[in-house]
Amino acid sequence: MLKRISTLDAVIIVLMAACGLAVKPVINPLFKLITSAFLISSGSVSGVIYMIFPMLALLIVRQPGSATMTGLIQGIIVLLTGIYGSHGIISILTYIAPGILIDFGFYLVGQKKWLIFFPTALGNLGGNFLVGTLFLRLPTFPLILTCVTAFILGSMSGFLSWNLYHWLVKHAPVLKKDEPFN
């Protein structure tokens, strides 16, 4: 998990968690409209946006466990407030699992830019698999279609996060860290 982190890093993690929750009620109805005809969950498509925030927290804070903490904070906020996307106590699991998978995926690929898609693709796949099996109880074919869509579209989040991270570092030098990932 996280070692010692600065106050700025803690603020970044909480900010990324809040941003991820703030965009959900805005974009989810749009993606539900698009995906309902194809029998796939809207989360597999909207995961393109959702997975940016835990990955961005990991890239900025540069410590393993940052994405997991982002997901944990999101799950706790959803559980306590009952806001959009709440599934009761299991919300913590459905929000923390993508963070764990993003951290694990990033650990596997390191900082190889050509593999930066993998952590977010894995996170989106894991989150959608959990929701598809636990809540939507999708039959086999729609579940496979949802998971394949989640992996393919989740990979876009990695590239978006990577480019957004470099844009942020360019325009907000306080976020730049010279040390490698711990």
Image: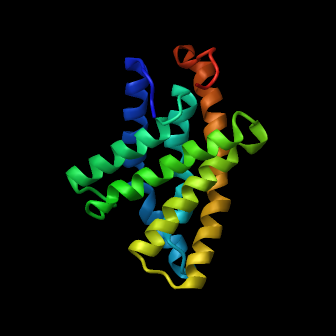
140 left or right of 1? right
In which quarter of the view is residue 55 placed? top right
Say which quadrant the C terminus sits in.
top right
> Considering only vertical position in the picture, is 173 above or below 2?
above
- Residue 132 coordinates in the image, percent (x, y): 47, 73
Count of marks, rendered view: 0
- Residue 148 coordinates in the image, percent (x, y): 65, 69
> Considering only vertical position in the picture, is 72 above or below 33?
above
Name the one closer to the observer, 68 or 170: 68
Res 65 seen here: yes
Give the residue at x 40% y 73%. 134
- Residue 142 coordinates in the image, percent (x, y): 57, 81
Give the residue at x 40% y 58%. 94
> Considering only vertical position in the picture, is 172 above or below 152?
above
Q: How is the image coloured?
A: rainbow
Give the residue at x 41% y 46%. 71
Residue at the limit of the structure toward the right, as seen here: 114
- Residue 105 coordinates in the image, percent (x, y): 62, 46
Give the residue at x 44% y 61%. 28
Name the one closer to the observer, 2 or 102: 2
33 left or right of 85? right
In which quarter of the view is residue 153 placed? bottom right
Say which quadrant the N terminus sits in.
top left
Res 31 seen here: no
